[in-house]
Image (cartoon, grey):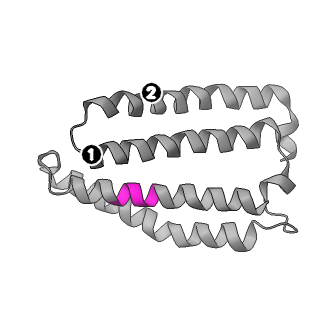
Amino acid sequence: MKDLRNIPLRIWVIIPLTFIFGAAAVRLAWTIPYTVATISKVVLGLSFVIVISGYVFLLRILIRPNSIKLKARQVRIMVTVVMTIGLVTLAIHTFRFLPSPEAAHPLSQLLAILLLAALVSAYPVILRYIWHVWKPGKGII
């Protein structure tokens, strides 16, 4: 956190993050009117919420780095909720993608399954970190 006190470094990190998250948000918002199925709109809407939440969280860390406020219970709950929404969204997307004609190539099916397996296996580890290590009084974050 001490390295983040350098204002030019923070600006140098914030600008590319703004472009990246802005492009992702625009792409997701642009796709919503063209989807037909309601569940696809739900997946896109949840993905949009995840992208915006991640951007706001990273901005909060970069603009005013305060490890005591970041370790607050409300922040840990919000990070957990956003991660859970991300896992549910990816699961819905994967289960809808596998039987679709877009997944005709075996490698795309394999990649979708591997991505879901990676997130499902990392989810408990991240939750353990958030609720057991990332607490007030610990010096990790």
Type of the residue with mark 2: Val
The image quarter containing residue 59 is top right
Q: Which percent across, then down, holds residue 77?
A: 66, 62
Q: Name the residue located 11 percent from the left edge and 47 percent from the top edge.
A: 101
Q: Main secondary structure of the magenta part?
A: helix
Q: Is residue 114 above or below residue 52?
A: below
Tell me which amino acid carries mark 1.
Thr
Can you say which quadrant of the picture contains the C terminus? bottom right
Q: Is residue 89 rendered magenta in the image?
A: yes
Looking at the image, residue 132 sits to the left or right of residue 55; the answer is right
**Chain part drawn in magenta:** 86-91
Q: Mark 1 falls on what kind of element?
A: helix
In this view, which residue lies farthest toward the front? 38
Give above or below for 63 relative to 95.
above
Looking at the image, is 7 positioned above or below residue 114? above
Q: Nearer the viewer, mark 1 or mark 2?
A: 1
Q: How many marks?
A: 2
The one of 45 and 14 positioned closer to us in this rendering: 45
Tell me the SS state at disc 2: helix
Q: Is residue 52 left or right of residue 133?
A: left
Q: What residue did someone put label 2 on?
A: 26
At a point 67% along the width and 44% down the height, the residue shown is 57
Hey, which quadrant is residue 68 in on the image? bottom right
Q: Report x, y in % for residue 124.
A: 54, 72
Q: Which residue is mark 1?
A: 38
Image point 46% across, 33% down: which residue? 24
Q: Position of residue 11 (x, y in %)?
A: 75, 26
